[in-house]
Structure formats: structure tokens, C-alpha cells
Image: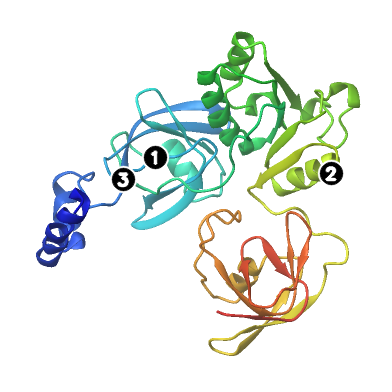
């Protein structure tokens, strides 16, 4: 019998007489990081990352299992007595602490609080790493495309590669609207100076730089046998996907917002919720999650980016459209991610 198996009865017996929720309730009053098994993290430092972005340094408790470069974590923040949750792509520094960079949205509820109001020493809920945005296997060149907050997973991936010495050619093309919005600019330039196989281009669209789909061929790195990773707003990812379709070895993308609705996606459809047989009229140019929320419903959801799968439900009939790729799906009894799929036809959802 293994030691893990042998110790299990004692653990179960402990849980029978000591409820983890009861333990957390009293232990966190002594130290907010003392929980039975819930990961939490303390804010220990904060610094500016750009004119509209702030980096927070967090020290997790022993229950946190870590994160792989490029993954996301869920951060739970208490604002005005309510726990609110947002998702960020962190990096892990040399001390084992994590750093998350928050772009401040002035009318947001969480980002202004994290950037300006949260006190050093405050404790947040911290989720484990999730997501499949990862460094590609193989030895071919890698092209990284980032826009806005899409630079944060790229930073984590590049830091991990710097520790390995960049064993292949890597290029980062980074788009921002204004030059003072470029996060980690000095850090990225220093990385390019230290590693000959890593190159950096920063394109400032507010100063006339072309967008991803209008960049001149001479400005692109060599694309033969390249793998492309793209991260940014939905419109940026969609344009990048169209630009490189069929030209590279593989294309991996992650978008943190939906692109603008395409022509022909106007109108409404009937969506039936099979558990209650309630019928709703939902717009074809909005995600199912947004449409359901507009009717006052509150489906389970997490990242709102199609990564964490918290909002997945079953499609019993009908067709949906993926907001990022534009692909339509009509397989019966198939899973649907509410946050990144829109209704194309009348639907029946297992909700």
C-alpha cells in the first residue's frame, strides 16, 4: 500500500470532524492566507507597466499549484463588499512570486481598484493555471503577434525561453495605439539586445504604423516553416488569422474580446432553454452569453474568452458561429462555449 493511500483515511477522518469551510472561516481571521486548501495570494508590490497599465506582484500561499507560461489565472477581488473575478495571464518571477499586469479601464469595477486602491498586504483569491496557449514544439522559427493586453502571455513565454537561451529564431511584433501604452518596453528591448536570435518590432498605430493585415512584406520576418502565436482583441486576432492562413506551419491564437460583427449576422433567432422550455429572442451578432445576460439570466462563466470552459453547455439542435474564427457548427449534442459562440439559427440549449 502506497503512503498516499495509507494517509487517505486519516485525511478523510479529519474532514469528518473539521469542515474545511469552518476552518477557513476562523483561520483566515488570524491570517488571511491560512486556508484548508484554497489558494490565495497577498499583494506585496505594485509598479507602473505603461501609462494605462499596472503590474501587481503577488505572493501565493502553499496551496497554489503554479502556472505554465502563457496560461491564465482567475483572481478574486473584494470590491465594496462583493467578490468579483477577473482573468489575467501572469509571469512568475525569480522569487516564486507571480506578477499580473492590469490594463486600467476607467469605467471598470476591478481594474481601477487593483491599479490605484488595493492596499499593499491585501489578500486575493487565486485560481490555478488554465489554458492551452503554449510555446510550440519543434525547432522552427516562432512569430509572436501581440496587441494591447495581448502582450502579457507573450512576456511569460519569452521569459521562459530566455532562461533556455533562445534555441531558435523568435520575432515579436507588438501593436499599441500610443507609444506610452507599450508594456514592458525597456524589458523587451533589453531581451532583444541580450539574445541575437530574438527580434522586436513595436508598431504604434497612432503614429501611422500599419496594422497587422497591412504591414508591408519586407517588414515581416522569414515565415518559412514558422509557427505563429497571436494574442489581442478579437478583431486583431481575426485579421492576423486571415493574413497568415495557409502560409505558416501552424497558427495559434487567443483573443480577449470578440471581433466586430460580420455582414450577414444581423437579426434574431429563437433560443430554447431545454430545462425550463423558456424561449428567448437572441441577436445573431452577439455571443450567447451576452444575449442570455441581456434577458436577466446569469449562466456560469469565467474568462469570457473561450479558455476556461466554465460556460460550456450542450447544444441539442441548431447552429452556432464561433465569433473569433467565423466557423459555423451544427453538430447535434455538441458542447458550446457561450462566451465565444453566437446563434446562427434557432437553437435548443441544455440550460
Residue 325 percent coordinates (x, y): 76, 55
- In space, the residues marked 3 and 2 are separated at their CA atoms by 41 Å
- Earlier in the chain: of badge 3 and badge 2, it is 3
Say which mark, if any, is on residue 40: 3
Where disc 1 sits, the SS reads: loop
Residue linked to disc 2: 245
Quadrant of the frame with the C terminus: bottom right
Crowd rating for badge 2 (residues with CA inside 10 Å; few <14, some 14–19, many 20+): few
Residue 180 percent coordinates (x, y): 64, 24
Furthest toward the bottom, the residue is 277
Q: Nearer the viewer, residue 166 or 126?
A: 166
| Residue 267 sits in quarter | bottom right
Quadrant of the frame with the N terminus: bottom left
Where disc 2 sits, the SS reads: loop
Crowd rating for badge 1 (residues with CA inside 10 Å; few <14, some 14–19, many 20+): some
Viewer-nearest of discs 3 and 2: 2
- In space, the residues marked 1 and 3 are separated at their CA atoms by 12 Å
Amino acid at each position: 500500500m502506497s503512503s498516499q493511500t495509507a494517509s487517505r483515511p486519516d485525511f478523510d477522518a479529519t474532514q469528518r470532524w473539521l469542515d474545511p469551510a469552518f476552518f477557513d472561516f476562523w483561520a483566515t481571521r488570524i491570517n488571511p492566507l491560512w486556508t484548508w486548501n484554497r489558494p490565495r495570494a497577498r499583494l506585496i508590490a505594485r509598479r507602473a507597466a505603461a501609462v494605462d497599465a499596472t503590474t501587481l506582484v503577488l505572493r501565493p500561499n502553499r496551496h497554489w499549484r503554479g502556472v505554465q507560461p502563457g496560461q491564465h489565472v482567475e483572481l478574486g477581488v473584494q470590491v465594496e463588499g462583493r467578490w468579483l473575478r477577473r482573468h489575467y495571464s501572469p509571469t512568475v518571477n525569480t522569487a516564486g512570486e507571480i506578477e499580473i499586469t492590469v490594463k486600467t479601464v476607467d469605467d471598470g469595477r476591478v481594474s481601477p481598484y487593483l491599479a490605484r486602491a488595493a492596499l499593499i498586504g491585501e489578500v486575493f483569491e487565486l485560481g490555478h493555471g488554465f489554458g492551452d496557449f503554449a510555446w510550440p514544439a519543434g525547432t522552427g522559427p516562432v512569430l509572436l503577434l501581440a496587441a494591447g493586453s495581448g502582450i502579457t502571455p507573450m512576456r511569460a513565454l519569452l521569459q521562459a525561453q530566455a532562461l533556455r537561451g533562445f534555441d531558435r529564431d523568435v520575432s515579436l511584433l507588438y501593436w499599441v495605439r500610443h507609444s506610452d501604452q507599450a508594456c514592458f518596453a525597456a524589458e523587451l528591448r533589453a531581451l532583444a539586445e541580450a539574445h541575437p536570435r530574438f527580434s522586436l518590432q513595436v508598431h504604434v498605430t497612432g503614429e501611422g504604423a500599419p496594422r497587422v493585415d497591412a504591414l508591408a512584406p519586407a517588414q515581416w520576418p522569414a515565415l518559412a516553416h514558422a509557427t505563429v502565436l497571436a494574442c489581442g482583441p478579437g478583431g486583431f486576432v481575426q485579421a492576423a488569422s486571415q493574413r497568415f492562413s495557409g502560409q505558416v506551419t501552424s497558427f495559434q491564437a487567443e483573443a480577449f474580446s470578440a471581433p466586430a460583427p460580420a455582414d450577414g449576422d444581423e437579426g434574431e433567432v429563437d433560443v430554447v432553454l431545454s430545462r425550463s422550455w423558456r424561449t428567448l429572442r437572441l441577436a445573431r451578432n452577439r455571443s450567447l452569453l451576452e444575449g442570455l445576460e441581456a434577458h436577466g439570466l446569469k449562466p456560469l462563466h469565467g474568462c469570457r474568452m473561450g479558455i476556461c470552459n466554465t460556460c460550456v453547455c450542450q447544444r441539442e439542435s441548431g447552429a452556432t458561429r464561433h465569433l473569433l474564427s467565423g466557423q459555423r457548427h451544427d453538430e447535434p449534442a455538441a458542447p458550446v462555449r457561450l462566451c465565444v459562440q453566437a446563434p446562427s439559427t434557432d437553437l435548443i440549449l441544455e440550460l
